[in-house]
Amino acid sequence: MNRPAFPFWPMEWWMAWWEALTPPPSVSLLSDASQAGALARIHATAFARPWEPHEFERILCERSSFAHGLWRSGTLQGFVLSRRAADEAEILTVVIAPALRGGGHARGLLREHMNGLALAGTRRIHLEVDEGNMPALKLYKRMGFTQVGARTGYYLKADGSRATALTMSAEL
Ligand SMILES: CC(C)(COP(=O)(O)OP(=O)(O)OC[C@H]1O[C@@H](n2cnc3c(N)ncnc32)[C@H](O)[C@@H]1OP(=O)(O)O)[C@@H](O)C(=O)NCCC(=O)NCCS
């Protein structure tokens, strides 16, 4: 057997062991503004200009808002937030906490969210994404979004440069 003897097994082994013992994340509707602070904290891990807790609180209190959270062991680990108008919706933001990124968790989160939107009467979903954001682009394409346009220089980045936003949409 090639594996080193306990306790000198590689870090990957211990991480896989920890993963196996930790319950899988679950997705549920965020139906009020009580998680606004947690949303702001997760959002700040991903964006140079994060939204303040009071901004999340205001958005979550709007009747047109629709949000789902990704939970693990009772802690919010990600969310997706949309705004509905008639039979259309716009995804405002989707973020997974850094420790869980790359694990495919956004797919289940977005699937549940899109199913919820469809049940609420939404027929088409729109979003904007930085053309250089490969994980997000791959996620959206996998979830059925296709590019419908581009806005050159739309995003102002932290270093002062500008990035193109791709506009995408999906039929439900
Ligand atoms: C975008 C985001 C929500 C994706 O969530 P996730 O759970 O990490 O997504 P996944 O693990 O399913 O990865 C999505 C795809 O990107 C790929 N990917 C992951 N990291 C990557 C990287 N650094 N470079 C290129 N591709 C990458 C994955 O392999 C996967 O592709 P696949 O479906 O073909 O296998 C997450 O990365 C995130 O929170 N990013 C910061 C916030 C953000 O950019 N939000 C979107 C714009 S609003």
Image: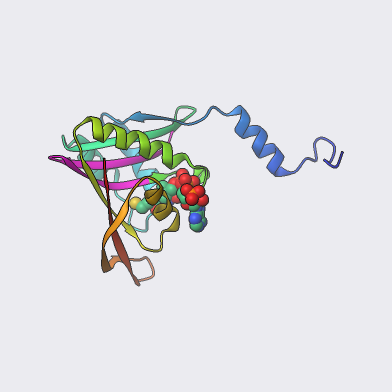
Is residue 45 visible in this depiction of the protein?
A: no
- What x and y, as percent, mark residue 77? 44, 37
Query: What residue appears at the point 30 percent right and 31 percent down from the top-left corner?
Result: 30
Instruction: Identify the colour scheme used.
Output: rainbow
The extreme bottom residue here reads 161
The image quadrant of residue 171 is top left
Q: Is residue 90 magenta?
A: yes
Image: 151 above or below 121 = below
Q: Answer whether residue 85 is magenta in the image.
A: yes
Residue 156 rendering spot, x and y as whole percentages: 31, 66
**What is the tally of numbered marks visible in this picture?**
0
- In the rendered view of the protein, which quadrant contains the N terminus? top right
Q: Along the horizontal axis of the image, is 84 left or right of 103?
A: left
Q: Is residue 47 above or below residue 12?
A: below
Relative side of 18 to 50, left or right? right
Magenta residues, start to end: 76-94
Residue drawn at x 17%, y 37% is: 62
Q: Which image quarter holds the C terminus? A: top left
Q: Position of residue 112 (x, y in %)?
A: 35, 33
| Relative horizontal placement of residue 124, taking residue 26 as reference (left or right) | left
Q: Quadrant of residue 113?
A: top left
Outermost residue to the right: 1
Asked whether residue 20 is in view, the answer is yes
Which residue appears at 15% of the width and 40% of the height?
A: 87
Question: Residue 140: percent from the left, percent from the top?
Answer: 37, 49
Dominant SS of magenta comes to strand
Q: Nearer the viewer, residue 121 or 78?
A: 121
The residue positioned 80% from the left and 36% from the top of the image is 7
